[in-house]
Image (cartoon, rainbow, N blue to C red):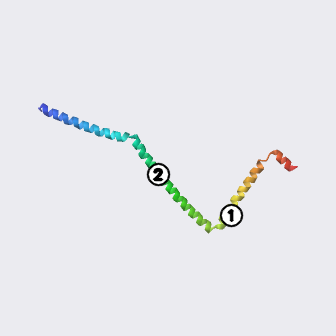
Amino acid sequence: MRDREQIEREMFRAREDLEQNLDELKHVVREKIDIPARARAAAERGKQQAVDLARRGADGAKRLAVRSKDFTKERPVLVGGVLAGLIAGLVATVLILRHRNRTWFDRLLDAI
């Protein structure tokens, strides 16, 4: 049978081991539950994604501007026709809206 001193030493080592494991577990739990740090990390990831999207959008806009400029130089008649159609449509819309907004009395006076 083991003597009392040996049993006490084993109990002491076991207690120290348990305390060390408990400290490590507390540390891990604190890291997992550290909400502000996790929120900061998520916000930083979101900012980086927004910067990347903005950069890609700006690059795409530049490419589109260059392509449209080239298209305009290659087909000036087509672009002029489209613009003339847009202006004619705008003028027609304004005239129709002005005609619709006239009151029945104005129409009656025009008819006389």
Q: Position of residue 79 (x, y in %)?
A: 65, 64
Q: Is residue 49 above or below residue 74?
A: above
Q: Position of residue 74 (x, y in %)?
A: 61, 68
Q: In screen coordinates, is 30 left or right of 61?
A: left
Point out the residue furthest to the bottom here. Answer: 74
- C-alpha span from label 2 to label 1: 41 Å
Of badges 2 and 1, nearer the viewer stands 2
Tag 2: amino acid: Gln
| Disc on the earlier residue, 2 or 1 | 2
Mark 1 closeness class: few <14, some 14–19, many ≥20 residues within 10 Å: few
Q: Residue at x 16, y 35 (%)?
A: 9
Q: Is residue 56 above or below residue 44?
A: below
Q: Residue at x 41, y 46 (%)?
A: 41
Q: Position of residue 61 (x, y in %)?
A: 55, 59
Image quarter (top left, top right, bottom left or bottom right) of the N terminus:
top left
Count of numbered marks: 2
In the drawing, what numbered circle is on residue 40?
A: none
Tag 1: amino acid: Gly
Q: Residue at x 73, y 56 (%)?
A: 91
Q: Residue at x 51, y 54 (%)?
A: 54
The residue labelled by disc 2 is 49
Q: Secondary structure at mark 2?
A: helix
Marks 2/1 in contact by CB < 8 Å: the verdict is: no
Point out the residue furthest to the right here. Answer: 112
Q: Secondary structure at mark 1?
A: helix
The residue labelled by disc 1 is 81
Q: In screen coordinates, is 56 left or right of 99?
A: left
Q: Position of residue 87 (x, y in %)?
A: 70, 59
Name the quadrant containing residue 30. Answer: top left
Q: Nearer the viewer, residue 14 or 30?
A: 30
Mark 2 closeness class: few <14, some 14–19, many ≥20 residues within 10 Å: few
